[in-house]
Amino acid sequence: MAAAVVVFGAELIRTAWICDDAYITFRTVDNLVHGYGMRWNVDERVQGFTHPLWMLLVAVPYFVTREPYFTAIALNVLLSLTAMTIYVRAIAASTTAAVLGVLVLTASAAFTDFSTSGLENSLEHALLAVFLVVYWRERQHRRFLWLGGSVALLMITRIDTALLVLPCALQAWVASRDKKRDLRDLVVALLPLVAWELFSVIYFGFPFPNTAYAKLKTGVPPIELRFQGFLYLFESLNADPVTLVTIVTGIVAGLFAGPANRRALAMGMALHLAYVVNIGGDFMSGRFLTPTLFCAVALLGSLPLAALEVAWPVPAALVLVCVGAGSRLTTGQGSGGYTWISPSRVTNERAFYFPTNGLVNYRRGAPWPSHEWAARGRAARAGHDRVIVEATVGMFAFEAGPAVHVIDPLGLTDPLTARLPAKVRWQTGHFGRRIPEGYPRSIEDGPAAIVDPGVRGYDEALRLIVSGPIWTRARVAAIWRMNTGGYEPLLDRYGQMDVPLSAVALRLPEGLQWDAPGTIHWDEVVRPADPHSRPAPEILYERGIRIDFDTPRKPRVIDLSVSGNDNYVVTLFRGDTATARLMTAADPVSDGALSWRALRVPRLSAPVDHLVILARAGDFRYSLGHVRIIE
């Protein structure tokens, strides 16, 4: 067992690295330690991190070291070795199970990659190990105090981890002999979570991290996110088969071969996996799968020998095959033969960052990390611009320092852009937004500089929440109204282009070039040379093209022409209610020229007054030629 843990530790240090997203947290830590408060931009109270406990944990040694890179790696390694030690000493049912479990976790690219990286995964693993030890020791004194405490710490680390452990806590309480006392202990133990949420609402103005609003309030149809979520699993199966196969094996073994407390964990693992699919997965290959993987290994390792003989051969054999093929333990620095970004736009983050951010590549006396984003941040610190629009907000913003206000068009750290509709082109975790005209200038001059009146009014309320005095009645009222959706109507029409039906009534010839005169077209790939300039009105449509009818109608067919190699969604509305949704299918052999489409409308119970046409997928060069309503 000791030898297996040593092998894991050696692999951990050999592959240690720090990702760009970790520096988003480090910027908040740096501002906190230097007395600016728990802020990302020093003039805004915004929770730009998803893992409060991890942020606070990093802040403690950072107060002494004033250096994030080695500090975070040391914490990651310490917590990962703690989790592994708890597994082999207190969870695994035998030496064989302990060794097999450690080897599986070591062979998992996702687990070893994110056991460092500067993110919260290692803390999740250690807390899950503590939780499982307490959960499976049913005779422990005041068990529910320990159980609830570990649940609270897990949820403060990352709130969606609750899906893994709450089924277990519920099963433990149902099986409890003294439900009243144990429920009281559980509630008392959860008080740290309640305290954090109260602090979050009072200090930041919101119960959830800013990243949650940036990634969940995107306007992207749920079916697209779920499809991308399945692609996330397929990419993991292709690039790192040990991880997903072990998870599925653990779920099956727990549901069909384990006692009730193993079935509850298996249900939590299945629930968490479904959640990952539902939100579209992540852009980091395997990152969201590592807590579930650790639970799967713990579950398999805790089963008695009879069940072990049935459950372990699948992942164990897979490890041997992968190691024999040189997939993981024999590859030092990167992707195990895979490019850093897959066709499904899921990235091998360590393969991308390792040359400039990997521990074994550290160069003494040189600025580190040596990544170009960090170098640009150091240049921005020495420059004169006080407000900068920048999408790579980790190393750049940390190195730029507190004097530079960085506007994040992805919305991860910016309160306004997080709540704007996303562009058509997106990657999970990277939902780009168009910067409203005048917004960069408004940081110094106030919301009046924003041109769009709806966005201006929304930003005024938001600015009161994140920058105004904390203890005022006006701020409390704004917090309540913002969190209950009272300001959302101000953004209803932002990012939507209004076109009268008469302007697109002329039927254009099929085969016309996609950007020919007379078409309404835009290119999602082209960006304005100056990020502060106002883009042409036909460049971006976050919420599509809205066509109002002169009088309510009951169309039977929508005749239109669109770029042939793209997909579009046509939605019919009566007021604010969608009554029908139609889709055009892309022609895979089309060169993008205009193509006629006749969409049959299902029988409507009442007339509709407008429709919205929204591009959803293709080559990101979209075009609308004409629209005719046939009744």
Image (cartoon, grey):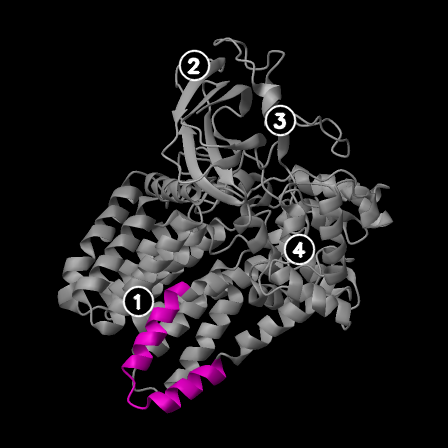
Quadrant into which the N terminus falls: bottom left
Task: Report, in whole angstroms, how far the alpha carbon at label 4 lies from the one at label 2.
Answer: 43 Å
Which residue bears the numbered disc 2? 590
Residue 453 visible, this orientation: yes
Assess disc 1: are there few (<14), some (14-19) or many (≥20) residues with their C-alpha within 10 Å of its C-alpha.
many
At a point 64% along the width and 44% down the height, the residue shown is 363
Q: Which mark is residue 359?
A: none
Secondary structure of the residue carrying tag 4 is: loop
The rendered magenta stretch, by its main secondary structure, is classed as helix
568 to 460, vertically: above or below = above
The region drawn magenta spans 163-189
- Residue that carries the numbered disc 3 in the rendered image: 500
Kind of residue at disc 4? Tyr
Which residue in the protein does label 1 denote? 265
First-in-chain label (1 vs 3): 1
Q: Earlier in the sequence, mark 1 or mark 4?
A: 1
In terms of sequence position, does the residue under pointer 4 or pointer 2 come before the other?
A: 4
**Which element type, helix, strand or loop, lies under badge 2?**
loop
Q: Which residue is mark 4?
A: 487
Residue at mark 4 to residue at mark 3: CA–CA distance:
27 Å
Tag in front: 1 or 2:
2
Please name the amino acid that badge 1 sits on. Answer: Leu
Q: Position of residue 373 (x, y in %)?
A: 67, 40
Element on which disc 3 rests: strand
Residue at (48% x, 50% y) in the render: 14
Going by the numbered disc 3, the residue's amino acid type is Pro
Q: Position of residue 598 (x, y in %)?
A: 41, 21
